[in-house]
Amino acid sequence: MTEAEIYEIAAKYYPQSNIANIKLIGKRVIIEYKNLAENPQITAALKQEISALLPEYKISVLFVEEKNNNLGVQAIEKWQIAGVKKIIGVASGKGGVGKSTTAVNLALALADCGKRVALADADIYGPSIPTMLGYEGAPLISNDGKNFQPFRECGIKSISVGSLIDRNTPLIWRGAKACGAIEQLMTQTDWGEIDIMVIDMPPGTGDILITLSQRVDFAGIVIVSTPQDIALIDAIKGVNMFKKTGTPVLGIIENMSYFICPHCGERADIFGHNGAKQTAESMGETFLGAIPLEPEIRRTSDAGTPIVAENPDSPHTKAYEEIAQKIIQRIG
């Protein structure tokens, strides 16, 4: 039984919006609800159903009250993004782990799952979505002088801070100006009706990322890491930072997980083996899946036609779609 399956059971007994966390650690299941009064009979029925499926496991059901923390999560007003039902962020503790490539292909995979998807590029200092979706250099358009029109490529809507500047011009903006630009793009774009918005977040744990985690009503965050220890150290910091801001973490993706030699078919674990999976398990987080180090993923992204769009039948596309299905289950 997976955490996603336990989540579905937990949502039958108490409101899904009150589920704060689901953890499957060793022989123990922990279900945590927030801002909710316990009904002992309902809790007993919940435990009974899970115990019937996992008879050797200890079932713990916790009820917690969310309080203000030192980052002031409760006191800060959220941005209003009209027409968008659920928002997920794709983040990484450091740059260079393939976060943006993952965000683009994950957005396309969510669309393949039948969802109306938008992709917002908030990676303010390294926006790459225009290149990956083939509209680099195209100007932003507003039909009414108030709201931007999103780009429509590969079956999804998207917008990027990269459309505000030339690709060779570095952005020398302090946090407040950068956050203001991101807010304008997200809240003053005519998105229409969107089931899931994917936000490509800036790497690291800086002030822009903290502002986004406070201002955006996230359904959850996906952390991208490679298997190597140096990347996982920063991924752990990212998970802990989102926990401090009260932002749910949906799970960890291991990118560049392994390499299959095109000549001999031998597998090489260039950056290590199962590092992200082991880290997720040790932190009580969900391991969402592994994406290989594959030249076709790089080539198609550089060409403006990501692999999920260009080769929908490839095993790499299937890997992204499996992760997308897990995320859909997690966010309901």
Image (cartoon, rainbow, N blue to C red):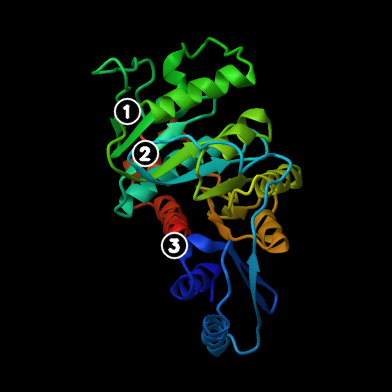
Task: Name the residue nearer the viewer: 130 or 199.
Answer: 199
Task: Name the residue nearer the viewer: 286 or 257.
Answer: 286
Q: Amino acid at mark 1?
A: Pro
In three-dimensional space, the C-alpha distance between marks 3 and 2, rounded to whole angstroms, equals: 18 Å
Task: Name the residue nearer the viewer: 81 or 162.
Answer: 81
The vertical placement of 250 against 39, above or below, is above
| Dot 1 or dot 3, earlier in sequence | 1
Task: Name the residue nearer the viewer: 110 or 215.
Answer: 215
Look at the numbered disc 2 and give the secondary structure of its residue: strand
- Quarter of the figure with the C terminus: bottom left
Q: Quadrant of residue 107?
A: top left
Q: For the point 56% across and 20% down, which residue is it? A: 178
* Residue 108 percent across, percent down from the top left: 37, 44
Q: For the point 56% across and 35% down, which residue is it? A: 212
| Res 35 visible | yes
Check contact, mark 2 vs mark 1: CB within 8 A.
yes
In three-dimensional space, the C-alpha distance between marks 1 and 3, rounded to whole angstroms, equals: 27 Å
* Residue 298 percent across, percent down from the top left: 48, 36
In three-dimensional space, the C-alpha distance between marks 2 and 1, rounded to whole angstroms, equals: 9 Å
| Within-10-Å neighbours for mark 3: few <14, some 14–19, many 20+ | some
The vertical placement of 309 against 134, above or below, is below
Residue at the spot of label 2: 118
Labelled disc at residue 150: 1
Residue at the spot of label 3: 329
Q: Quadrant of residue 224?
A: top right
On the picture, is 88 further left or further right than 191? right
| Within-10-Å neighbours for mark 2: few <14, some 14–19, many 20+ | many
- Quarter of the figure with the N terminus: bottom right
